[in-house]
Amino acid sequence: MAQKTSAKPRRGVKEFIRKFFVSLKRAPQNIALVVLAAAFIVYSLNLTSIANTTARVNLANMGQCEFAAMLFSILAFVCFLRAFPKRQKPNMVMIGLVFVMMAILIFVDIVYYNRIIESVAGGTVITSDTAYIAIAQNVVVVHIVLVAVTAVLLATLPVYSKILKSINTSIDVEDNGEMGAIDISSEE
């Protein structure tokens, strides 16, 4: 039995990293998209603690802040996807909307965070039964940081996209130098 040889040699991790950088060179905005998605996931997975904190503390506008944070997280994600259509120029109106929505997200998170601080200063004691208040406070801070990082990444996209494009991702192929001319005149 003859062994089958594959047409593509296995390159492993090195090839994976090369392909990863090639895809980043084509779509560098995916870095900011991943951070925005992480912000949404962190906030969504801890929504129970945030809702329990809203019910327990029950200060002005906490429910609206919670609702606005979820709504604008989803809308910012959708607008971000619409801002960078494939093989077309970025849509500046959508990019502007993404920045507006991220500003709203940071604003409502700060308002929510301040309401928690007011509650704790006003006498709400965080015990083992109300540990969700501390969790919600930490989640809101992480959400603010991740949204701010997304805004910075989106604002500096032209800078780091040029840096990514300067990375050499070409493959060196053996005998890729000069090839001699093939003489086919003597064949009959």
Image (spheres, rainbow, N blue to C red):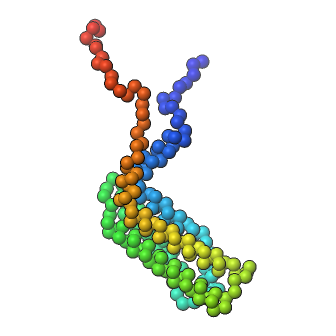
Q: Is residue 86 above or below residue 135?
A: above
How far across and down, in percent of the image, does residue 152 sit?
43, 66
Please indicate whether residue 51 sits to the left or right of residue 163 in the image: right
Q: Position of residue 55 (x, y in %)?
A: 62, 85
Q: Residue at x 48, y 70 (%)?
A: 147
**At x 54% / y 79%, what residue is drawn?**
66
Q: Residue at x 74, y 79 (%)?
A: 128
Count the marks: how many?
Answer: 0
Asked whether residue 13 appears in the rendered view, the answer is yes
Quadrant (top left/top right/bottom left/bottom right) for the N terminus: top right
Vertical position of residue 46 compared to residue 113: above or below: above
**Image quarter of the C terminus:** top left
Q: Position of residue 8 (x, y in %)?
A: 49, 32
Q: Position of residue 28 (x, y in %)?
A: 41, 55
Q: Say left or right for 93 vs 116.
A: left
Give residue 123's quadrant in the image: bottom right
Q: Is residue 67 visible?
A: no
Most distant residue in the bottom direction: 122
